[in-house]
Image (cartoon, grey):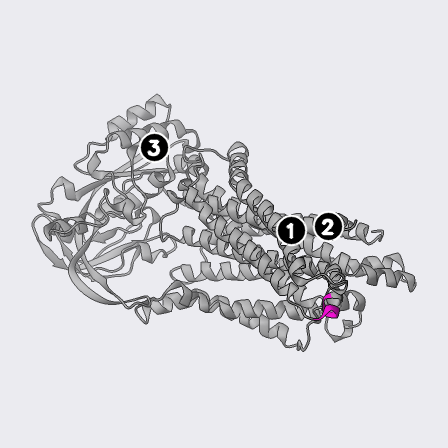
Amino acid sequence: MKTFSEVYAALRRQNRGRYGLLAGCCFFSVLLITAYACMMRAPTILTILPEGGDSRKQVMMVFVLAVLGCAVFTTYAAGLFFRQKSRETGIFLALGASRRLLHRALGRELAVIALLSCTAGAALGAPLAWGIWQLFRLFLVDSQEMPLVFDPQAYLLALAFAAYVVCMLFFLAARFIRHTNIIDIVQTSHKSEPIHAVKRWYGPVGIVLALAGALLGYLMPTFFVTVLHWYAPGAVNAIFYLPALAGLYMILLHTVVHGWGGRKKRYQNIISTSMMQFQGRQTVRNMLVMTLLIAGAYFASFYTPMLSTSAENTYAARPVDYEYHWRADQRLPQRDEVQALADESNVEITSWAQQDAAVLGTDGTYAIETETGFGATYTTAYAELLNGATFFSESAYNALTGQGIDILPGTCANVLDDEGGSGYLSGGDVTHLTNMVTGAEMDVTPVEPLCYTMLLGCYVLDDADYAALTAGLTDVWREEYVFFNVADVENSYTFAKSLFNEIVDRSGPAVEVGDYYDQVASMLAAQAGEAYEYAPETAADLGLPTIDYGDRDSSAFRSYWKYMPQFRVLDQNDFVTTMAVFLMLFVFIAVVCFAAVIVIAFTRCMTIALTNARVYDDLRHLGASNAYLFRAVRGQISRVFLVPAVAGTGLIWAFYLMILYFNSDPYGFTSAEVAGMGACLAVIAAVSALLYAVYRATRRSVCRALRIHN
């Protein structure tokens, strides 16, 4: 070897592991972000997740966590690469090589690594997402909405992240070469990054800050809207989560430096604890990334058991097996036709209740928004005629529900769910009613709400008031409700499917609308010469799900059709296929995030082993037994796995409980939510077992690298 290039190439071959680790980290990060971006922006997903809805916000939130985690991970991997390369670089400088020559050689290496790893990651991201999705379809659930279609624009997000990786590599390389002191470069690989001045109060204060930040971050947007009448930008809302991030960082610092054993155990495992402290900043950064990814992964993991358990409890708690309703101008199956369908399927109908209802205009307040350049503010105004709602007479309500309520003349009661919650879905109190055909009006006084989930959002009037106010209504403003039971509901699926198809086939274009469509508001807009924004032809422009009789088995149709029947056996049996895209999307997100956690944890643990190999060798020469060395390794590896797992799990569990508590009206937990959180605990147990298995495998690999018998 006579030339610089030959020597440099020989050193590169000698240190293939360093280059492989950097390339692998960059490849995995770009692969992860590309797969996530392709899935998140796929039309298959976007048609199911309503724009501005909570589900889409959750997907974006976890994506941001994944981007931050992968960005920190690749930056750390690059920093480790340059630390390991510092010695040979310093020797080249000492032998007279110019910085320009070294920078050019290093630049060529990084260009190849960045080009190959980022290109491979971006190219394989979509196939990875498609492959995982196909496995879901094959082994879990499949439906007409499950075929996955990608949007090429999703690659813009992947390219942006790949650009960050490339720029970060060359920036760190330039900073690395700019070192003026050769001795500093040579000694870079031996320098530690210890943590100093970490007080013992960091741990308790960190816990308080983490909880306070989660509480503030969740509640402040509601405070801005309800109290300040301000729609704050997302960046402002995100600021209030920063105390939680700072608190989490303090918890991890306290754990690495002091642990949680108290002063009595400060000298126990002093070797492993000291080694962790001397790589403290690196360790804490990795643990913080892992904690955030674990929290995001669990947040996605909880979606499926919560939704499934809640739906199952809701279906089982229904007091009536079959319910369907229609606008009176539609010619839907009557009792004799339903009986004929039942006879064809050998289903016995044991009870039948049919009552009429009416759509009346209601008063209410509406918001008038003003753009400020920094969010928007709003004022409220009152209108005697604003929206529409479905009203029953008290006798019709009692006949359908079996309750014996008595509504006094001049009063009105809205209907909540069986547990007295879901007030935000009930329409609230109304005080002024209008007949949309005759113009007759009536003032009413709100009284204590009624409870019946299957009629959630409806209202009940006194019989005489109902008769007076609905006189003259045409069939367009009237509705019919049918409740009936069968002898063996579990074996009536064929009948339920036939009746559902019959209902859809006989429903006309006039009722091919979503539950967001308001008949009164549409009429008022037409009278004012304005376009109604929630009209079927423009709903898609607002990101709302469109209703199409041809897609009657889709999630959008089953979830949002205004006249969707409630058949217990149909809803139970078709739940998984109906919600397949929802469920599988969040399972996919959880799988991707947990995979990232496993790779980061394994990489960090192997790095600790290689960094401290000389220390362990010195301890072995000083007489340390294999058992002692194994305990030291176990102390380091377990801390890398255990602390983020406990912190991330505990943080997201408390945050999820808080969300459920404040989402209820009144505040508290419903029975379905309690059952759902029980299912989430089972998910935590399963994932914890998986992480423990990975921890054991990682520990074996570290011990093998350090020549320690476990």
Where is residue 19? Give x, y as percent.
69, 50
Residue type at mark 1? Glu
In magenta, the rendered stretch is 181-185
Disc 2 vs disc 1: Cβ atoms closer than 8 Å? yes
24 to the left or right of 520: right
Magenta region includes residue 152: no
Question: What residue would you read off at disc 3?
Answer: 350
Residue type at mark 3? Thr
Disc 1 vs disc 3: Cβ atoms closer than 8 Å? no
Question: What residue would you read off at disc 2?
Answer: 12
Using the numbered discs, state the Cα–Cα distance from disc 1 to disc 3 in whole angstroms. Answer: 78 Å
Q: Residue at x 21, y 59 (%)?
A: 430
Where is residue 693? Give x, y as percent.
70, 48
Q: Secondary structure at mark 1?
A: helix
Instruction: Give above or below for 525 relative to 285.
Output: above
Instruction: State the image quarter where residue 268 is shown.
Output: bottom right
Callout 1 crowding tier (Cα within 10 Å): few <14, some 14–19, many ≥20: some
